[in-house]
Amino acid sequence: MNTIRFVLALALLLWAPAWSQTAEPQRSSLPSRELAPAQLLAELLRGGYILYFRHAATDFSQNDEKMKSYEDCANQRNLIDRGRSDARAAAAAIRRLGIPVERVLASPFCRTVETAQLLFGRAEKMQEVRGGPSAPADAERYAALRSILATPVRAGSNLAVVSHGNPFYSVAGPPYLAEGEAAVIRPLGSDFQVVARIRVDRWDELGGAARN
């Protein structure tokens, strides 16, 4: 009997890794390769990409538990002065680089709307970019965001999305975006591909790489 148990346990041990690889969903939206900075800038100037920003730095002593509406900024986690300064600096760099952005979609929270306005001077509030109701078993919570990130953007311009860390992590996988960090996304119609991540203080490096 002990011999039978040993054989069964050994078979399970050998079989489990192969099973776990097939059971784990594959994220085809993870980057297959990172574009070099000079090439990335050239692509962004041509347009057709999505810039997904996590909101800038916030006050983690605050939370959203008591908010009565999205307009109730006093009861939300909001930007701190460093976050506002970072967003303004990133905005200035994006303007200097000449990266064209047409629409700016923002999660309706105050921190995301303010970040969008500091970056681009405008914000189109959209619930879909932050996901639906937070039911743990709801696999379709981020279906609308996936659709937005997969939908092609016309040449000559780019789409900006300003939202949160959790929605992007859920559809694109690790690592988490830092506050203020942007992911550059190539929409593919039925899916999307992350081609770069740009920290909030690294936008000027694209211009430096292009000049070298």
Image (cartoon, grey):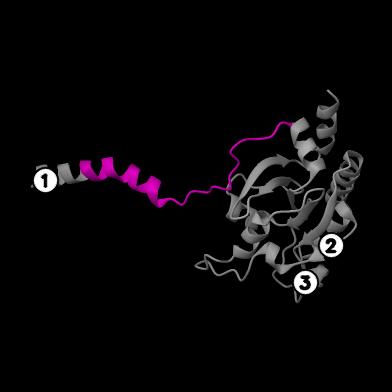
Q: Earlier in the sequence, mark 2 or mark 3?
A: 3
Q: Which residue is mark 2?
A: 123
The percent position of residue 195, horizontal first and vertical second, equals: 67, 41
* Depicted 109 relative to depicted 35: above or below: below
Q: Nearer the viewer, mark 1 or mark 2?
A: 2
Q: Residue at x 69, y 54 (%)?
A: 152
Near mark 3 (Cα within 10 A), the count class, few <14, some 14-19 or many ≥20, is few
Q: Is residue 206 above or below residue 18?
A: above
Mark 2 or mark 3: which is in front?
Answer: 2
Is residue 79 in view from this perspective?
A: no
Q: Which mark is residue 161?
A: none
Q: Earlier in the sequence, mark 3 or mark 1?
A: 1
**Is 23 one of the magenta-colored residues?**
yes
> What residue sits 69% from the left and 47% below the top?
185
Residue sitting at x 75%, y 61%: 62
The 10 Å Cα crowd at callout 2, few under 14, some 14 to 19, many 20 or more, is many
Q: Is residue 31 magenta?
A: yes
Q: Identify the residue under disc 3.
A: 70
Residue topped by disc 1: 4
Which residues are the magenta region? 10-36
Amino acid type of the residue tagged 3 in the rendering: Tyr
Q: CA distance from mark 3 to mark 1?
A: 62 Å
Q: Specify which label sits upstream in the sequence, 1 or 2.
A: 1
Indicate the amino acid at tag 2.
Ala
What kind of element bears circle 1? helix
